[in-house]
Image (tube, rainbow, N blue to C red):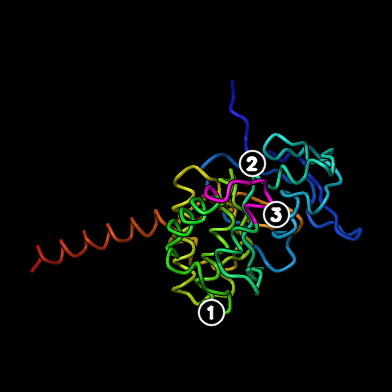
Amino acid sequence: MEARHLIDYRCVTVNQQELCILDEIDFHLDAGEFVYLIGKVGSGKTSLLKTFYAELEMQDGEAEVLGYNMRTIKRKHIPALRRKLGIVFQDFQLLIDRTVTENLDFVLRATGWKNKQARVNRINEVLDMVGMSTKGYKLPHQLSGGEQQRIVIARAILNNPEIILADEPTGNLDAETGKHIVELLRDISSRGTAVVMTTHNQQLLHEYPGIVYRCEGRKIEDITHEYNRFQEFDGETEKEQNNNNLNKEEEE
């Protein structure tokens, strides 16, 4: 029996304020996959992410996320769906008047964790996973942008989500810090959690390969092969260069 996709979209159309954003698109996501969504501003990347957590409705097609039919999902079932997702926003959205630990504890209590010691243990686990085990006492404004984004990722993985949705997670960070954030997300992905990440940073796609979808002209297209081709070309070029160097040495 064929395994069910975590996300399975077929001929899906998405409108926003009566404007067609995405038209008859297909999209599939499986466990452990690391997927980039690229495209110009307004191409539909963020709109697509919003449909995954029922923030934006679809007009046509078949759409399933973690077993939920997104065309017919009832409002009362949306919180249960979202507990299976981890969402990472570009602008962090941390509670500014609460410490890191209090931010994470707030999420756990809101999602049904009643045992205080269990919450403390889980907070310590996720802070250690994102390299922030000594920062629990700090307020958000006392952290750098990269540190705040690590806390946002810690918040996203608190409930062991099957999917992480990251909307431009490196957009407000310098290049080096952005790389560290992608490395962290890829590490999480390697443990079985699927990651879908929107980005404008083409360099990341070359340095940290994944599945690549491009949003353009109200469509999305899997263009992973284009990046694989470039990588193969680079490898072949290097091989040819080595051969040329050997030939030169022999001639000399």
The reply, left or right, for residue 4 in relation to residue 245 is right
Residue appearing at x 44%, y 53% in the figure: 187
Residue 118: x and y, percent?
Answer: 53, 47
* The residue positioned farthest toward the right in the image shown: 18
Q: Is residue 80 above or below residue 209?
A: above
Residue 142 — which label? 1
**Which type of secondary structure does the marked residue at label 2 adopt?**
strand
Label 2, residues with CA under 10 Å away: few <14, some 14-19, many ≥20: some
Residue type highlighted by circle 1: Gln
For the residues marked 3 and 2, what is the alpha-carbon distance in whole angstroms?
13 Å
The reply, left or right, for residue 199 in relation to residue 229 is right
Q: Is residue 113 magenta?
A: yes
Residue 119: x and y, percent?
Answer: 55, 51
Q: Which residue is mark 3?
A: 49
Q: Which residue is mark 2?
A: 28
Q: Which residues are magenta?
A: 107-118
Residue 38 seen by the camera: no
Q: Is residue 6 magenta?
A: no
* The residue positioned farthest toward the top in the image shown: 1
Residue type highlighted by circle 2: His
**Which type of secondary structure does the marked residue at label 1 adopt?**
helix
